[in-house]
Each structure stands twice: as structure tokens, then as C-alpha cells.
Amino acid sequence: MPELPEVETTRVGIEPHIIGRQVKAVVVREGRLRWPIDPGLPQYLKGRLIKSVGRRAKYLLLSTNAGRLMIHLGMSGSLRITTHDVDPETHDHVDIVFDQTRLRFRDPRRFGSIFWLPGEESHPLLDHLGPEPLTDALTGDYLHQMSRGRRGPVKAFIMNADVVVGVGNIYANESLYKAGIHPARAAGAISAKRYQRLSKCIKETLNAAIAAGGTSLRDFVREDGAPGYFSQALEVYGRAGMPCGQCGKVLKEIRQSGRTTVFCAGCQR
DNA sequence: ATCGGGACCTGCTTGC
DNA sequence: TGCAAGCAGGTCCCGA
């Protein structure tokens, strides 16, 4: 489900509902996520004030007056704001309980994770991450330099979180299409000029998706349960067999390291 | 050092 | 209609 735009949509959505609020309780109905939830979590979090809601890569970081809650939504996770009278459904694994509302974590596939980071501590999962794509740290020169000597396909290269964070399968497909780059081309064999174009296309694609509230395919919903509308703007993802919007050729589908890739053999070289 | 594949889970769609 | 296979937005970890 969530790539960076969906996580950012979630961040913006929950922020006004929880900022400045005090955690009254934490209810863990199912702690077996990608990594087990620390049984001490409720006691660490109880009584804390939420000071800010940040994001690093696809991790949400809820800062309190003494430590941070780090949440990853995995493939199928979502966060909603609800009231106390709404009963949890199947896969509603965790509630962060405030006075009037609850922040409810739902994750059918349980690929998500929740960690408590005491004080100012970081987390090993955060330490190796590449730059944020929507900052000046991502440039064509950076991608070009990082790609030298790499023989793997450019699609896997831009989806590698050590290189740049936040580019998942949907937006990797869309960005490469926009940039006119064939997804199977070796990352190390692409010119600096083409990487300039690609970095621009990644930013444009992610920004447009954020503006539309993310992409809802199956289960992504915003904090109020509403879907995102970027699926209507997807040019290649999910459109294999349909005509390319630019040249009219039929869009092709291939598998690259277990993920579906859709592209236009006419426009992407 | 880099790369591809398997693993972790459930639910939905597809095809026989 | 029923059942099994295949696939899904992520990403860590392993062996080659």
C-alpha cells in the first residue's frame, strides 16, 4: 500500500488530530508485526505529549516529550482517527488512546512495524537510509554518481532505499516512464543528463501524488477513511496491455526481481 | 560490494 | 459454486 505519498498523506492527515494531545493508554490487540511490538510500549508511551508528527522515508515519527514512536505501514497498513465508540475490526492491531479520539493502526498483512525510540535515540533501520527525494539532496548528479559501476537495472536502483528513499513500485514505474528511461537498462550505463531528467521526474511524480492524496488501489485510505485519487493519474502502473498515452503502442509488462514492471517500449529507451 | 530471490502475512481475483 | 494458484503498494536477510 503505502509509498512515500501515502505515508505523507497519512502524516498530514493525523497531525492536527494528535499534536499537543496526551496519550491516555495504548491498546495492543496483536503485537506480532514484522517485528514484535515491545511489550513495554504502553508504559513507555502513556502520559506522553505528542509534540510533532514527522516522517523519514516511509517511517512516521511521532515525537513526544521523551522519546519517539516510529511506525511503518508495510504493504497494507493504515492509520485512522476514530472515536471511542467505534469498535475495532479484524486487523485493527493497535490503538493509541487520547481523551476524545484514538489513533488506530490497521494492517492485515502485518508487514508493518512499531518501535519506541527512547530519548533522542535513532534506530538501526533509519541509519543506512539515503536522501529524501523531495529535498535538494536528491539531484541528477547524485544519482549519476551513485550509479557508477552498478550493473543492475535502473528500476531496482531507484527503489533501493540506500540510494534514495520513498520510491516504491508504483512511482518507480511512473517516474521511469515520465523520464523516458527503459526500466531494465543498467543503472551504471545511464548518462548524467538522463539522471537529471529522472530526478526531476521522481520529484514531480511524488509531488503530484501527494497533492492528490496518494494512490488508492486496494486498501489505502486516509486518516478519515477516504481514498486517494492519484490512481486516476497513473500512466503505466496497472495499465499493461493498454495503449501508451504518448505514442499509442501497447504497454508491456515484465517481472523484475519479483515486482511487476510496466513500460512503453516505444517511449522508454 | 552488488544482486537476485526467499521470507514474512492476509485477502482478493482469476481460472479451471 | 468451489477450490487452488497467483498476485499485491515493503524491505530485511541470505547466499552466490
Image (cartoon, coloured by chain):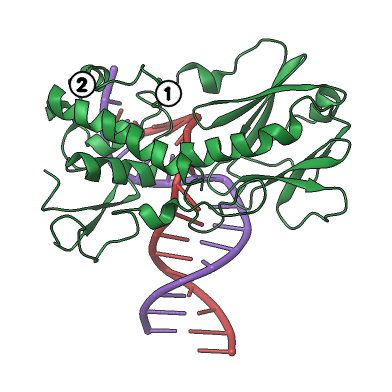
Chain colours: A green, B purple, C red
Circle 2 sits in a helix, a strand or a loop, which is it? helix
Disc 1 residue type (three-letter): Glu
Q: Considering only vertical position in the picture, is B8 above or below A8?
A: below
Q: Are marks 1 and 2 on the same chain?
A: yes
Which chain letter matches label 2?
Answer: A
Q: Count all numbered tags in the image, as a single digit.
A: 2
Q: Which residue is mark 2?
A: A144
Q: Is residue A267 left or right of residue A131?
A: left
Q: Is residue A255 left or right of residue A79?
A: left
Circle 1 sits in a helix, a strand or a loop, which is it? loop
Q: Is residue A231 left or right of residue A192?
A: right
Q: Nearer the viewer, residue A48 or A246?
A: A246
CA distance for labels 1 and 2: 16 Å
State which mark lies toward you, 1 or 2.
1
Q: Nearer the viewer, residue A16 or A267?
A: A16
Q: Which residue is mark 1?
A: A132
Find residue C16 and report its image quarter: top left
Find residue A238 and report its image quarter: bottom left
Disc 2 residue type (three-letter): His
Find residue A147 and report its image quarter: top left
Which chain letter matches label 1?
Answer: A
Q: Residue at x 70, y 53 (%)?
A: A91
In the rendering, at what x and y percent does residue A207 appear?
41, 36
